[in-house]
Amino acid sequence: MTYHRPFSLSQYGRIRLSAVAALLTLVGGAALAWWIVTQPPRIARTPPPEPLPAMVDTITVSASAQAPNLYGFGRVEAEQETMLASRVAGQLEHFAEGVVPGQVVEQSAPVAYIDQADLMLSLEDAQAQLANAQAALALEQAEQQRARSEYESFGRQLSAERRALVLREPQLRQAQAQVTQARVARDQAALNVERATLTAPWRAMVQERLVGAGSLLSQGTEVLHLVGVEQFWVRASLPSEWTEWLEAGSRVTLTSRGWPEGATREGTLVSMLPSLEENGLQAQLLIAVNDPLALASDGPALRLGDILRVSFQPAIQEQLISLPSAALRPGDVAWRVDEENRLRRTPVTLAYRGEDDALIRSGLETGQRVVIAGLAQPREGQLVRIRRPNDTPAQAGNEPGHERGNEPGDERGDKSGDNS
């Protein structure tokens, strides 16, 4: 027999309260979860850190007596060049020994020979004509002497005109003129024989043979192309504003990519030409180089048409301040750093500006610190930091992890030196 305990009312009440509490807990938890999900995240807003001033490179400038290093490019050309031509007509027999392109011939040395047969016949004919003229003059002088004797024996005085006719003075002058003509013809024929041997007008190198042996030449036919070897010229171009640093007689150093490393030649500035270069409107200068083919000295030889780099060493000097060209901004402006590490805009007057460096005539003073790198958009009065030798590229980039001691407001940052 099974005994069933009766279900009391108090137990039933406790079950209802537990269910309600569980339901309320579930609803409250769901509501709390929904509220948490729907609420945006709350982030505490803090003011951004003040950016560090830009780090710059500076140099401390000083004035000194100096001149710019000027350089340009020029082309080698001949100082003496000629097309040696025949001055007489005839057949070219042969060239002298060693007269080949690339060889040097001495001044007045024979270089080519023309057939002299016809010229010798002309010379003999001229000599015979001279002998005939001299004989005719001797006969006329005898006739004049006889006429004078007859006139004196006649015993009468005639007018000057009739007296000249009686004494055969016109006939004598004609005979004398014929002798002179014959002598000139003889000398011309002898000169033509001499000119049948062509000689070098100066010490030269044979550039080219223009005709061959056996060619029939007329007067003026070009036979040889000669180039003088005593001196070459280099025609160089420079900006017109640089010419104020140059004067005739200045030394010039010449280099070429085709020469051995470190090889140079010396030249002398001869003159500044009055005309400008057509393409770049630059000033043209003429530089003389002695012994250009290095025949009597050591060194690389110059070749006609070669392009050389010319470096000038001006003798004129001024008290100037040197700066890298990159330190100058458009309008010839430099930025310097004052005692409080703030930027100051400084217009300057240039004496020279090249690709790498510039010379300042006025606007800066000795001891001032000039910014040479690190500025993107400078402003007047902008606070900057000066790079120290031990600064790394990361520090130069204003990395956030800097210690306060590296900031420009810190005493140690202000006392950092420049890289001058």
Image: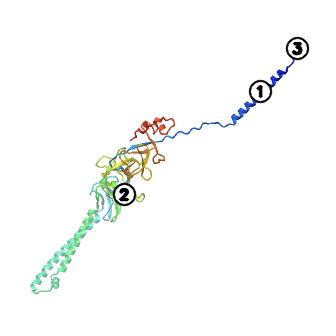
What residue is at 38 percent from the left and 59 percent from the top? 276
Q: What residue type is labelled 2?
A: Gln
Residue beneath label 1, please? 21
Q: Residues within 10 Å of mark 3 (few under 14, many from 20)?
A: few
What residue is at 27 percent from the left and 68 percent from the top? 122
- Which quadrant of the figure contains the C terminus? top left
Residue beneath label 2, please? 284
- Mark-to-mark CA distance, 1 and 3: 33 Å
For marks 2 and 1 on the same chain, the one whose residue lies earlier in the sequence: 1
Location of residue 5 (image quadrant): top right
* Labels 2 and 3 touching (C-beta < 8 A): no
Residue beneath label 3, please? 3
Position of residue 16 measured from the top left corner of the image (x, y, whole percent): 81, 25
For marks 1 and 3 on the same chain, the one whose residue lies earlier in the sequence: 3
Q: Is mark 3 on a helix, strand or loop?
A: loop
Where 44 falls versus 218 (above or below)?
A: above
Q: Which amino acid does label 3 sit on?
A: Tyr
Q: In this view, does 198 lie to the left or right of 46?
A: left
Position of residue 144 measured from the top left corner of the image (x, y, whole percent): 14, 79
Location of residue 124 (image quadrant): bottom left
Instruction: Using the image as rendered, state which of residue 415 and residue 125 is in the foreground.
Output: 415
Position of residue 366 measured from the top left corner of the image (x, y, whole percent): 35, 46
Q: What element carries label 1?
A: helix
Position of residue 39 measured from the top left corner of the image (x, y, whole percent): 68, 36
What residue is at 23 percent from the left and 72 percent from the top? 181
- Which quadrant of the figure contains the N terminus? top right
Q: Which amino acid does label 1 sit on?
A: Ala
